[in-house]
Amino acid sequence: MMRKRVALALALAAVLAAGSLAACGGQESSSSETTTAKAAEQGGKGTEGGDGAPSSDTVYPAGTLTVYAMGNPQYRQQYFETWLENHRDIAPEVKIEFVQTEGTADIREKITMTALSGATEDLPDAAMLDPVTIMDLAKAGLLKDETEYLAPLLDKMVDGATTDATIDGKIYALPDSVRPQVLFYNKEIFDRYEIDPETMSTMDGYIEAGRQLKEKSNGEVYLSYIDPTSKTWRYWGRRGLMPSAGAKIWDENGEVIIGSDEGTKKALGALDTMNSEGLLMKTTIMEPALYDAINNQKVATFCMGAFWDEFMRQNCEAVKGQWRVMSAPEFEGVGKAGAPVSQFMGIIEKGDNPYSELFRMMWYDFTFDIEAKEVWVNSMEEQNAPYSNPVSKEMLEDPFWKEPSEFYGGMSFREMEGKCLENGAENLAVTPQDAEADEIISAELEKYVAGNQSMEEAIANMDKNLKSKIGKAEVVQ
Amino acid sequence: MLKAIKKYKAPYLFILPFFLLFLVFQLIPTVWTLYISLTNWKGIGTPDFCGMDNYKKIAVDNMFWESLGNTVIYWISGLILILCCALLIACLLNSRFLANNTARAFFKTATFLPNVCAAIAMGLIFRMLFDENVGLINEIIALVGISKIPWLTSTTFSKIPVIILNVWRYTPWFTMILLSGLLNISKDYYEAATVDGANSIQQFWFITLPSLKNILFFCSVTLTVDMWKLFNESYILPGPGTSNSSLFQYMYESGFNVFNMGYASAIGVVLILILIVISLIQFVARRRQGEL
């Protein structure tokens, strides 16, 4: 009887232990033939074309090429799937999957956790990345060094295309897009109230236009919006007014200077003026309430990244043809029109990544194949889907990128996007402490928007909290 | 110890799987957390030992203290509101007013429904309900003639939706626990009290509550742990800055938004210490009352 009980207990323990171990086990690799993969990668590198375009006679192993991305990656997948269909000779059984993520923090979390668990075969083959994530992943050895591959292509791409992916002279990701800060405005509203949009070329003029709109519309029309969440810092602050005003969070040595920086006072002071004078509609961006206001002509402008175009096209059909774009307002004494936002595709360093070279080929085609890109962009226009200007100089010269846009009343949004890059401000210095700094700064700005403190108090608290929590940043670039 | 193990081999073998899992998934991670809290680590690469730096940072981090304060408010309000609501509903479900078994079964199911709904889905619905511009709550308030309340965009009000969602979600579970306790109280006590002329309130105060003491203690302990690890409700209903963040949420955001794993681990260690202290106080208080 006793023996039976012992045996039963042992069996139960063994089953549970086996179950636990099974649960910890990794999934089957997305591609099985690592030997072929190695050969493919070596073959790919060896047969690189003279102009930087990779070519390969290697047949890539069956499997799924996984890419972590954000936004609406299903549309990008359409391009890559078409490419794969046209290249079945080298990738007969390769599929591509763009995995939708919440954003770069989510991508980083997924990659970090997978790498930590040791399940490198579960890592994606590539991922859409921002400069801070590139910095951290490159430091951890999780990104492939693209310096050698990109060197012959640099002259073919717009200026600064690889700047934010360059760490200590090495480039760790393939440029995906460089999008400027632009000023979207509803021409019909400006015509109705007889306000010249050109006055908005300076920040003072922009604020004055807001005052006139408020006065002439009896407070019905807002100049723009202010978001009670962290998006105010993201879009108005870090990517918008701060670089335009030449503001700094850290000095060259990484010391916190946001509290005493004149640029910060100028940038956040402008936001304070607009907010305190009631020129900004308090609402969450990218939510139905704001789209309703836009469709009802209650909001006249957006000083935003060019990405806002896709949200407008998708959600503001009622005001189609009324909107125009111009360069973002410049601060007096700075003369810069907003900083561009770069996005990159990093190839993950995961040992035997069988698709590194294949992904480079796809990226090259997406970046430099004029004809294929135009077909895809037309399809995106039809679907009201997102796309961005190319980073290829040659492609930008093509008349296609100057074609008029229906949503912008015949103005060419694509051409304006290119033009708005011309007088772009320099981005805030990228540091590994940026995510933490953003959390601290945004919390104070959110309290300001909630009406709990003045802007002066908010800036002073940002300075105090950055000093006590971070102290000194590592200014890499 | 070894003698006991040798003597009771079979029972120890039966509980061995639990201890193996506890060791792998709880004890080792806790020790690892303690170690990581003494380092600067961004989740990848090698952790750099930094001694007590993360704990020093905690001492001067107003976001931490604000989150801690919020968690205390969620805990106290949760303990009072959830236990009171749960006890009230449990008494109603157990009362003679619901003599019909079908009605009792219906109300039991209906009461339990909020607990089986996904927290995130409910959070999204609550976010719509409490929206300042188009939310149903403000529409109703406006009908009464009161101006709209910035539920989630003001530091003053942002904790209220979280507390309401919290109470709404947790009450059913504790109602069921308390109801099971009520069902175990012998009817004889109530019959005797009725014969002695005790009214309903006296019966509740002198029979029901003392009989439920142990269950209420169990509920308060589990509720304390639940409230201190509150995450979903405040995460899905964010207010300005950390005005309604819970400590658990702040720990998560420090770890997975900011990727400051060392700092997040330090917050985790502080959280563990707080929970140990609160649990000890509860147990000591019960022991002094001679209940344990």
Image: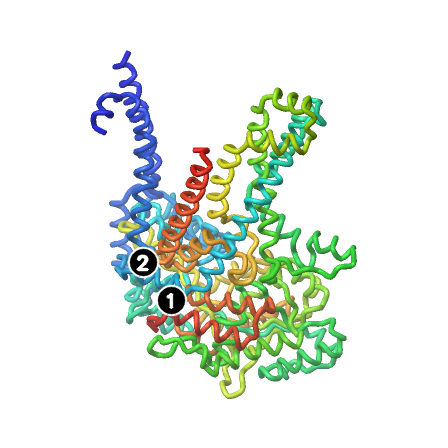
Mark 1 secondary-structure assignment = loop
The color scheme shown is rainbow
Q: Quadrant of residue B201?
A: top right
In the image, A119 versus A278, the foreground residue is: A278
Mark 2 secondary-structure assignment = loop
Left or right position of A434 against B193: left
Q: Is residue A472 visible?
A: yes
In the image, B21 versus A363, the foreground residue is: B21
Q: Which mark is residue B268?
A: none
Q: Position of residue A98 (x, y in %)?
A: 45, 51
For residue A308, above or below residue A268: above
For residue B18, above or below residue A310: above
Query: What residue appears at the point 66 percent right and 68 percent down from the top-left corner?
Result: A281
Q: Hey, which residue is sitting farthest top in the picture?
A: A1
Left or right position of A79 against B78: left
Assess whether mark 2 and mark 1 are in contact (beta carbons under 8 angstroms).
Answer: no
In the image, A67 versus B46, the foreground residue is: B46
Q: Hey, which residue is sitting farthest front in the picture?
A: B196
Residue that badge 2 annotates: B41
Q: Is residue A422 visible?
A: no
Q: CA distance from mark 1 to mark 2?
A: 12 Å
Say which amino acid is labelled 2. Answer: Trp
Chain of the residue on which disc 1 is drawn: A
Say which amino acid is labelled 1. Answer: Gln
Residue that badge 1 annotates: A433
Q: How many marks?
A: 2
